[in-house]
Image (tube, helix red, strand yellow):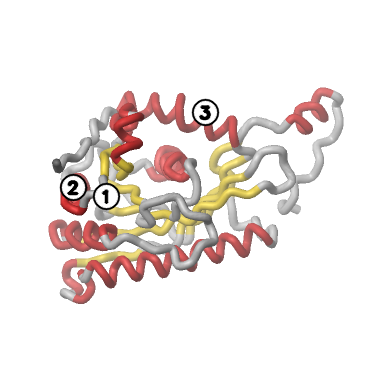
């Protein structure tokens, strides 16, 4: 049986779920969320765009939503495994819809639904439509290579560009590290966007070539992020969300002690 659990986007419920279930959990669980971007955020007149990231942790979609709600403000949707969305249906209010990769025909239906979402007018005023996908299709260790992308990501980008003229692709490299604090830090590093354009001809719209290029640029961004974080080269990052203080910092503040210097930020 083919079916897609469709999104039921609702602006107010989207905001409530974000504040109460996403941002609150992120603030409680991380020391900070850091962001760096190789290019400006997508402008209001951007073509529809796809955010594609590595999938190494349960937190990945949470971080992408933090990025969108705090910084990018697009009319966002996300492709979620059908088993998970059936269990946590309230994420449909935030634009989640299902994919069943175990059934190829159902997966095609989900891709077609994603293309329809990207090519329809946005619900938010002055905001492009966006789609978050994790082309690895499953959680895999952060430093596993090759990443191993499914081909559906390239097909969605190609079909979207064919229908509306262009589709932008933003690689999101995500990483989690303990850096001198009780709680881990989360890092989002956004690489330069790729632009798939209808007027560039058939070869530029080849889904396999698009997928291969997406995997290549995300691998490069992940390697750059890993190298910078483990070497404590953190000056290019800015705080996006401040989490709760660790116990040692609370105790030092209570005693009136000067806070210890943060590792990597001298």
Query: Is 120 positioned to the left or the right of 60 in the image?
Result: left
Residue 103: x percent and y percent?
22, 49
Foreground mark, 2 or 1, reads 1
Q: Residue at x 31, y 66 (%)?
A: 211
Q: Residue at x 34, y 65 (%)?
A: 194
Foreground mark, 3 or 1, reads 1
Q: Nearer the viewer, residue 24 or 5?
A: 5
As drawn, 131 above or below 232: above
The reply to whether the C-beta atoms of the residues labelled 2 and 1 are less than 8 Å apart is yes
Mark 3 or 1, nearer chain start: 3
Residue 24 - label:
3
Query: Is 142 positioned to the left or the right of 162 in the image?
Result: right
Q: Report the Cα–Cα distance between label 2 and label 1.
A: 8 Å
Neighbourhood count class around disc 1 (C-alpha, 10 Å): few under 14, some 14–19, many 20 upward: few
Neighbourhood count class around disc 2 (C-alpha, 10 Å): few under 14, some 14–19, many 20 upward: some
Residue 126: x percent and y percent?
27, 42
Residue 102 - label:
1
């Amino acid at each position: 049986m083919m079916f897609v659990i469709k999104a039921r986007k609702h602006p107010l419920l989207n905001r409530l779920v974000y504040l109460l279930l996403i941002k609150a959990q992120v603030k409680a669980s991380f020391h900070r969320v850091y962001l760096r971007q190789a290019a400006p955020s997508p402008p209001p007149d951007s073509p529809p765009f796809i955010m594609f990231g590595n999938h190494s942790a349960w937190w990945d979609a949470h971080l992408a939503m933090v990025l969108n709600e705090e910084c990018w403000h697009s009319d966002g949707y996300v492709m979620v495994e059908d088993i998970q969305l059936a269990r946590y249906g309230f994420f449909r209010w935030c634009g989640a819809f299902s994919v069943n990769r175990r059934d190829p025909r159902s997966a095609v239906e989900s891709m077609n639904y994603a293309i329809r979402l990207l090519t329809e007018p946005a619900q938010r005023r002055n905001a492009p439509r966006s789609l978050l996908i994790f082309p690895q299709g499953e959680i895999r260790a952060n430093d596993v290579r090759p990443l191993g992308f499914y081909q559906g990501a390239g097909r969605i980008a190609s079909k979207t560009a064919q229908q509306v003229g262009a589709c932008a692709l933003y690689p999101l490299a995500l990483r989690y590290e303990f850096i001198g604090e009780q709680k881990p830090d989360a890092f989002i590093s956004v690489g330069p966007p790729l632009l798939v354009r209808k007027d560039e001809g058939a070869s530029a719209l080849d889904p396999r070539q698009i997928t291969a290029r997406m995997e290549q640029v995300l691998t490069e961004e992940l390697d750059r992020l890993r190298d910078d974080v483990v070497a404590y080269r953190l000056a290019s990052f800015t705080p996006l969300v401040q989490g709760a203080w660790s116990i040692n910092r609370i105790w030092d503040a209570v005693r009136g002690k000067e806070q210890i210097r943060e590792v990597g930020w001298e």
